[in-house]
Amino acid sequence: MKKYLQVFKISFQQEFAYRVNFIMWRVRNVLQIFLIFFLWDTVFADPERIVFGYDRAKILTYVFGLIVMRSVVLSTRSIDMPGEIARGDITNLMLKPINYFKYWFTRDLSSKALNLAFAAVEGVFLYFILKPQIYFQNNIYYLSLFILSLAGAIILYFLLVFLFSTPPFWIPHFAWGFMFLLFVFTDLLGGGVFPLDIFPQSLQNLVYLTPFPYLLFIPVEIYLGKFGMTLSLKFLAVSFLWILVLAFINKKIWSLGFKAYRAEGR
Amino acid sequence: MDEGVEKVIKVEQLVKNFEVTEKKAGFLGSISAVFSPKKKIIRALRDISFDVNKGELIGFIGPNGAGKTTTLKILSGLLYPSGGFIQVLRFDPWQRSPNFLKQIGLVMGQKNQLWWDLPAIETLELNRAIYEIPKRDFEENLNELLELLEVKKLLNIQVRRLSLGQRMRLELVAALIHKPRVLFLDEPTIGLDVLGQQKIRDFIFDYNKKYAATIMLTSHNMDDLIDLAKRVIVIDKGQILFDGELKELVNEFAKEKIIRVYLSKESDFKKLDTIGTVLRFNYPQATISVPREVSAVAAAELLQNFSVADLTIEEEPIEEIIRRVFRGEMINKIQNLKNEKISASL
């Protein structure tokens, strides 16, 4: 356990070494929030208006929920993995008595801790600038289900990044392509741009079969209490099922990947 | 071989193949590679066998692409072998079990593990945690390594600000902080100046002696091999061509002797040509290379026909022999010899 504490510490320090990078990434996040906020603010200019079951307060809560979800779920360090594999830098870790998954998960947690701290500050800042009406959930059951779904989302995204990192084992010159695909899926099918219940029901049902809505959309909706208890529990079960499936697939693919690994590069 | 000696590395009939996709040059070549990729198998190692005893320091020689680095990578568990049997410290390297990894180290001259943006001490602290080194041992090892490699003052400087030589020495500290019993060194002195090379060489020598560590070293630097390795393995095109003492390699392949002669009177340079191959002529000194068997005759001839002030007969320098091995010139020779040996033993 101590080794991972040390990994957490050094990773934290590393983030600070790239201050400008980190700050730009936070700025990008804030700008994205502005964009989405003003889009929906315009749509809901009339306070009486209800679209797709969202009133002004709920849609704005959704948007602010995204700030938190993005910084907790989507901020990762493990996106460096495809590059590491392609360049052959993964060699350094393979030579050491340390668990590869746990190493990167720890680094992700350290990145999330840092991002969450910044997101909290940004959240307060944006709240006072935009003065949105926010919906505060006070039902303890929904809150606990939300916490569980958030934990699930973190693990799920980690497993997805891990899976989408493997192609360079076989095609080292194609390190980033699949990762971009993952980003697009996450935003589009995960609810990063708009709430998914805008889609027609049949399409929604299809999307719910993929792991993506469990990353952003469903945890926020659980918080808002839109699903009711039974459906929330059902979604929670599906997301944990996906975790099992992806963990299994990762294990298989990574062991094949290591076999194909060429330890090339300088 | 002695039963009492502990065999640290066992390699039997090791084979490693790589599959590569060939791409023709140019834009059209790139397109055709997408639609009809041409796969080609590269046989990096074909049937390699050798043993290494505890405490040995072995030099691994061969031209570029001979399979040296591939062998080291397989021995340290990075590459999956295509065939054969490998054991290091009684472990199968591929399993990469923590107990195995705690006892080995691989240093590649072109790879770094130090965190680029942080001072080296941070990486060392991380390694202390990863290898679970007790604090006291860690401090002891660290002090010793820092002193031997003379890098104490560099510990708290961002790695990116260090020179290559300084960084390389700190890389060694990071790779050895867990005191590996088996050490693989791939071009450890690459890119360093003469002084830096010497420091690293002295250190490797001491480390081998002090801890009876088993070390395998590949290098393009002749001095590394001459200074350090008693036993060498010559490898080319994935096959072992020679495995034995460096001295033996020299004896077997030094077919020439070098006569160094100081003339007391200026005489015809052309006439020297009749004795042997004139390597250098700069009056009054001449350096002539002659076949081993006739060196005595050649010397007599020189004394008779020239006014000689001084004359020495020397062995061909080891560097020259190894350089020829690198150039691949020896390879046919060694191959023939091997065939002779085989046919003799049949």
Image (spheres, helix red, strand yellow):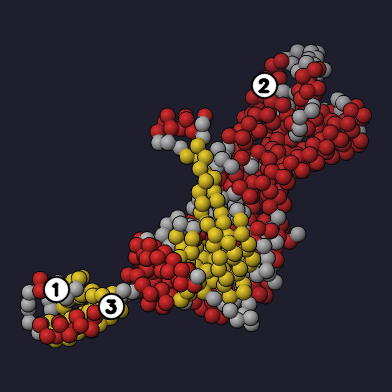
Q: Is residue B258 above or below residue A157?
A: below
Query: Which chain is home to disc 2?
Result: A
Please name the residue that numbered disc 2 is placed on: A38
Disc number for residue B292: 3
From the viewer's perspective, is the residue at label 2 or at label 3 nearer? 3
Position in image of residue B165 (x %, y %):
44, 64
Marks 2 and 3: same chain?
no
> Is residue A197 found left or right of A176 in the rendered image?
right
Please name the residue that numbered disc 1 is placed on: B274
Amino acid bearing label 1: Thr
Foreground pick, A189 / A140: A189
Earlier-in-chain disc, 1 versus 3: 1
Write the residue at 23% across / 74% down. Answer: B289
Tag 3 secondary structure: helix
> Is residue A71 found left or right of B78 in the rendered image?
right
Write the residue at 49% across / 53% down. Answer: A266
> Is residue A17 found left or right of A59 in the rendered image?
left
Amino acid bearing label 3: Arg
Marks 1 and 3: same chain?
yes
Marks 2 and 1: same chain?
no
Position in image of residue B142 (x %, y %):
59, 72
Tag 2 secondary structure: helix
Measure the C-alpha gap from mark 1 to mark 3: 16 Å
> Is residue B51 found left or right of B242 in the rendered image?
right
Position in image of residue A230 (x %, y %):
92, 29
Position in image of residue B57 (x %, y %):
51, 74
Query: Which chain is home to disc 1?
Result: B
Classify the position of the N terminus of chain B by image quarter: bottom right
